[in-house]
Amino acid sequence: ILVVSYIGYQTQEIPVGNGGKKDITMQDDSELMDEVVVIGYGTQRKGDVTSAISSVKSESFVKGAVTDAGQLIQGKVAGLNISLPSGDPTGNTQIMLRGISSLKGGTSPLVLVDGVPGSLNTVAPEDVESIDVLKDGSATAIYGTRGTNGVIIITTKQSRKEMAPTIDYNGYVSVSNILNRPDFMDADDLRQKWNEGYTFNGANLKDFGANTDWLGELTRTAVSHSHNLSLRGGSKNTNYTASINYTNRQGTFIKTDFEAINGRMDITHSMYDNKLTANVSTFVSQHTMPRSWNTYAYRQALIHNPTEPVKDENGDWFERDLYFYDNPVSYIRETIGEMKRKNIRFNGSLTFRPIESLTLKAMYARRSTTSTDGYYQTKKHVSTTKSGRNGYAYRYDSDFDNNLIELTANFQKAFGKHNVSVLIGYNYEDNTNSNLSMSNYDFPTDAYSYNKMEAGMALKRGEASMTSYKNSDKLIGLFTRVSYNFNDRYLLMASLRHEGSSKFGKDHKWGNFPGISLGWRINRENFMKNVNWMDNLKLRVGYGVTGINVADPYTSLSSLNYNGAFLYNGTWVKALETIRNNNADLRWEKKHEFNVGLDWDVLGGRLGGTVDYYIRRTKDALWDYEVPVPPYMYPTMLANASEMENKGLEILIRATPIQTEKFTWNTNVSYSTNSNKVVALSSEKFSMDQDYFYTGYTGEPIQTTTHIVQVGKPIGTFYGLKSVDITDDGLWLVENKKGEHVLAEETDATDWQVLGNGIPKHYLNWNNTFNFFNFDLSINMRGAFGFQILNYQRMYYENAKPEIQYNRLNSAFDKVYGKTQLKDDQRYVSYYVEDGDYWKIDNVTLGYTFKLSKQHIIKNLRIYASVLNLATITGYKGMDPEVPLSSNTYGLLDAGTDNRDKYPTNRTYTFGVNLTF
């Protein structure tokens, strides 16, 4: 008997007989093609999925030196934008799924690691088996408020029953350099300008005789390495998995490093003929990073006079008493600091199957995070010397604890052509946050650093500071879901979550979040039975409601702070002051989402894809509104009075254009477009004086807003003066509200207009994998289009005005509009709002897998080399057009700002090995 099998096709047994040639036709097996997809609180056959869910398996992950689990699927899921817009080794990936749906809610999805809430940087990428992304409301409604920005479900690698002990080692070494260095004047450039007769009237720009590369003094070639060792195995009743991971990442700036140690253990034991299964899982990590770095030092390196020395003739730091002008090397070298974060995650579960169709599960999980942040400026630090202090210390300690209890019952039964699944569940979650921060100065010695806070004399004079807080909140959910499949053609899934949060007003602590989706497997209809090339054609329609929780646990309550003071008998007396009003009506933001999608596969799975269109409407959106005092005690209040709309299209095409015995080419292309607009900013109870407000901020010395949020306009809209020309004297000419060209100083806010938008309208990803004999090559490319970037470095430093006291870009002396050099005050005008379109060859990895005998102790050996940030095609003049999605202060409201002191992006070369024993 000859047994012939292949993934996606039926296994066939062919009698060999007397030999001779055999013609075998492979028959499609749609059941094998219906792989398992992880959904909320369970799994489902891919063919039965009726919501917008994307699943990425480990073989399709991004290869190379990824920094966290999120980068594994960068560019792999349509509508999911994952970026790491900074070279900072301590930085995290930023994620936005299907655009913006809230003014305050952020964009971070819920991340679940083996069903337990976690984060992308607390699981080693080497430990991940698959990542499933729940995108639409019908899929995420069962998670209520936690799922409004989507859900990312990470499944880690597990052992199998009766699996022989297997040891895997994955390690790499990488080298990184700054991708694009900003072109500021060096000492030779500056002296050449002087020789050309150029006069700098600023007192700072004079020749001190040195030739200092200030940026070079702070940067280096960074060498990083990572090592992951795992053990997996199992017997008939017990499976075990254990892994340990060590990562040491250097930053391209000195004193920017990241060290992580992660350990994981998972044990599963089945008993009573597999009716009862117990699982225990533990994860422990410690992340350590220096606290010495500050982006202010990077800014100082850019603007510093390159003719100044780092140290004077006496070996002391060369410092000058100028406003916002400090020796950047001193600023970093004379700082001691470290941040240490410890994470512990434990979860245990019992699963009981009294009958084949019923599964009962109880789970308890606990997460704890302890952070210690210490920072010390020595007696020689420029900040302490200028302020007359003898050393300055700061310390911050915080604790976070989360407890989660989940109880579920799942019934699944087939009745002829009917397949029914019913899930009911309960979950309870509580969070507790606490911290203590303190600062002190005037220390007798630098030896204590931040480890003996009471030694500073400022404490004895009553000039030290100390703050602390503790808060807690609770979330309770009751949920149910029904899935129905008739004849493997007509599909239904409906869910409902009843959720309560302690964060909301007393009248609105509970909310209902329904979801429903329908599916039609068109290719299973009789009228399609002769269409042999069509393997799968499924139409999906879904609707769901999710909510957005508020960040502060006590937002709905009146709050007092012991911070104010009043004059009593000629003496200022500390007193309690109101800092927040009571709002019993504070309630959930609710996002209503409609989704329609189509899944298709043809030619035996060689070509396929998905198309999804969605519309989101967020009602009762939260914002801070001004309220009268009295009757209120505080002049602003967080309230539900806004509304937003968000809609988009997602297309994914995957193909295997070439598949031979020696060579295979797999490719997939994904495209997504998204648009949003503000529908309302006021309600009957809470309103603004106008239908807009300004946001974003340039900082000194320009000091103006950069964006507008207005009814009818999208979030991320740049708003300011439109520059049209320049005078012969180098002064800006801008367009006023009458369309006239006038000097910028002759305008006011009524002359501002829309200058662009900082959120890309279109995203495109193209991923390719080639296999030739034992070689594998992957090329990942991605791009963003239809957006603008405010180039802060050009706005501040591309100006030839002599009175500016700091160093500047060489391009400052180029002619503006081809006429003359700019010699106006530094201003925010449209000239610095550039098109941000880009296309990146993001990650290229070449690997080779050695052929080893089955008797060899090494079962698998692969070596590889990769390049991250290989090339970027763009017209943007800044260092990198992939700027942060949001700022720390304004969130996504000031999207598209390329800050002047952003940590530059790196190009990274990696060499690695994968071993299996």
Image (tube, rainbow, N blue to C red):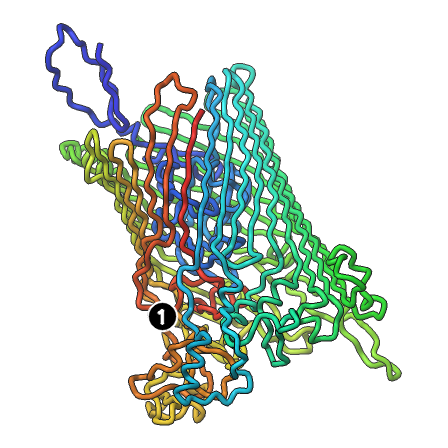
In the rendering, at what x and y percent does residue 320 appear? 62, 79
Seen at 47% across and 32% down, the residue is: 169
In the rendering, at what x and y percent does residue 493 appear? 40, 40
In the rendering, at what x and y percent does residue 691 appear? 46, 77
**SS of the residue under disc 1:** loop
**Placement of the C terminus among the 4 image quadrants:** top left
User: From the viewer's perspective, is 266 left or right of 582?
Assistant: left
Would you say residue 425 is visible in this rendering?
A: yes
Name the residue nearer the viewer: 509 or 206: 206
User: From the viewer's perspective, is 432 left or right of 194?
Assistant: right
**Placement of the N terminus among the 4 image quadrants:** top left
In the rendering, at what x and y percent does residue 248 appear? 54, 46
Q: How many marks?
A: 1
In the rendered image, the vertical position of residue 606 relative to residue 201, given as above or below: above
Name the residue nearer the viewer: 682 or 248: 248
Single out the residue that lies furthest toward the top. 18
Name the residue nearer the viewer: 549 or 431: 431
Would you say residue 697 is visible in this rendering?
A: no
Q: Quadrant of residue 447?
A: bottom right
Single out the residue that lies furthest toward the front. 313
Q: Quadrant of residue 860?
A: top left
Q: Amino acid at mark 1?
A: Lys
Q: Which residue is mark 1?
A: 877
Bin the neighbour count of mark 1 within 10 Å (Cα to Cα): few under 14, some 14-19, many 20 and up. some
Name the residue nearer the viewer: 535 or 121: 121
Seen at 50% across and 25% down, the residue is: 232
Seen at 72% across and 67% down, the residue is: 379
Seen at 61% across and 51% down, the residue is: 501
In the rendered image, the vertical position of residue 655 relative to residue 708, given as above or below: above
